[in-house]
Amino acid sequence: MANPIRIQDIAQHEGETVTLRGWLYAKTGKGKLQFLQLRDGSGIAQCVVFKGEVSEELFQNAKDLTQESSLIVTGSVRANTKAPGVPGGYEVGVEELQVLHIAESFPIAPKEHGVEFLMDHRHLWLRSRQQWAALRIRATIIRAIRNWLDDQGFINMDTPIITPTAGENTTHLFEVSYFDDAAYLAQTGQLYNEATMAAFGKVYCFGPTFRAEKSKTRRHLAEFWMVEPEIAFCSLEELMDIEEQMLVYVVEQVLAKHRPELEVLERDVSKLEAITSPFPRLSYDEAVEKVAEIREQTEDDELKAQLDLTWGDDFGSPHETELTKLFDKPVFVYHYPTAAKAFYMEPVEGRPEVCRSVDLLAPEGYGEIIGGSERIYDLELLERRIEEFGVNKDDYQWYLDLRRFGSVPHAGFGLGIERTVTWLTGQDHIRAMIPFPRTLNRMNP
Ligand code: 4AD
């Protein structure tokens, strides 16, 4: 066995004899040739078995390989830019072949399958090219976010997943038993982040988040990953700047590292290249007017009904979708009605019916990917809001303490990873943007 390499590095080994280890993605053959498409997780390489160059036994073994059989191949790397469909422009002339396991008939053939079938076989579906491409981009998005925040001086503070109280709302809680007590899976790390913020200045938590929402939309998961920065002495305007800079960096990283994956996903990259600063910023009032105009102009009666909106309502998916179609960049919508948003949001001075909140809506109809706000830092107001929230104030004493001991204006936001991946990869549904999705109807496999 020669030097084992990963397929992603194959170009650096032209002319050398190397070993590749992986799974058979696909196979074609005619006469004296077998073309094995070998995948190793880092890429796909064409391995050519030529009857004249190998033993009878090796040639037969290659012919007998089934889809997803595991194997180790040794051979020489050569350029092949002429033949169509040679991934990466290099191939391996096979000299040795070790078959580790002949796979049973693989349920996911290169043909159309229904989504439910694919989801039932998610543990195997992950191996297909589109899934591979999207989840690699997901990993880069996560890394880019962490790198950007770390470079900007944010400190990573992980917040608890098992929590005694509601963080965002009281209706979408997953209850778990915690020894003799009831507890809830975290809906947000924000409240704890506000405590770490007062200790470290600029912090972020990054973890799984749980919402028992009975939503079956293409934007909702019951378990998703959220990054939540929290910043002391930060205004809503500064918060928008931070969100914008972070997102522009993330998009740059995806474009720099994942052109081939974006091509697999048939993503129109010109749409991503357009994501540059500045992003448009609209107040809720302005956004409501725009939605009303769109509603006025459409001849689609169904859409007209969906876009019906009274001042004070939060936007639903149809409103967000139509709004974002007006811009080729993400759009900030700020100053939402206080009643439509979470209890901790700072009211606008002189206009308490709206609050210092901001959502970032992704273009092309993708809608909200970030929610954020300035936080109430006055003790009495926060106490009042907690009472209105309908929970036991005693449970929030530690949170109220943050307003008793050196309260400062501060702000933060939460970015949903899977929604961001859906948008950047140009997919139409959130469910495959996480390795094993948890949705209203599914927690298997
Ligand atoms: O707007 P949300 O609910 O904000 C919060 O939880 C704040 N505590 C964040 C903060 O200020 N620290 O959620 C933030 C983001 C949304 O914009 C969306 O991207 C994502 O989390 N999100 C979901 N993603 C998938 N499935 C769901 N059910 C989601 N709910 C929210």
Image (cartoon, helix red, strand yellow):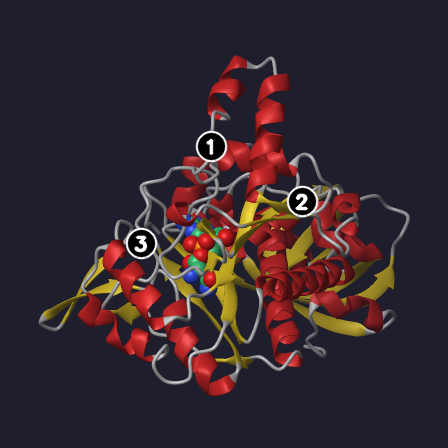
Asked whether the beta carbons under mark 3 and mark 1 sit within 8 Å of each other, the answer is no
Crowdedness of circle 1 by 10 Å Cα count: few (<14), some, many (20+)?
few
Q: Nearer the viewer, residue 249 or 287?
A: 287
Q: Residue 324, position in %: x, y? A: 64, 38
Q: Is residue 69 above or below residue 4?
A: above
Q: Nearer the viewer, residue 320 or 95?
A: 320
Q: Is residue 67 visible?
A: no
Q: Tag 2 or tag 3, which sits nearer the N-term?
A: 3
Name the mark on residue 114.
Answer: 1
Q: Check disc 2 and report the residue beneath it.
A: 265
Who's the residue at 38% across and 43% down the image? 120
Element under disc 3: loop
Q: Check disc 3 and report the residue beneath it.
A: 169
Q: Is residue 18 visible?
A: yes
Q: Residue 104, position in %: x, y? A: 45, 49
Badge 2 amino acid: Leu
Asked whether the beta carbons under mark 2 and mark 1 sit within 8 Å of each other, the answer is no
**Cα separation between marks 3 and 2:** 36 Å
Q: Nearer the viewer, residue 112 or 318?
A: 318
Badge 1 amino acid: Gly
Badge 3 amino acid: Asn
Q: Tag 1 or tag 3, which sits nearer the N-term?
A: 1
**Cα separation between marks 2 and 1:** 18 Å
Who's the residue at 52% across and 40% down the image? 429
Quadrant of picture, ligand 1: bottom left
Quadrant position of the N terminus in the picture: bottom right
> For residue 277, which quarter of the picture?
bottom right
Element under disc 2: loop
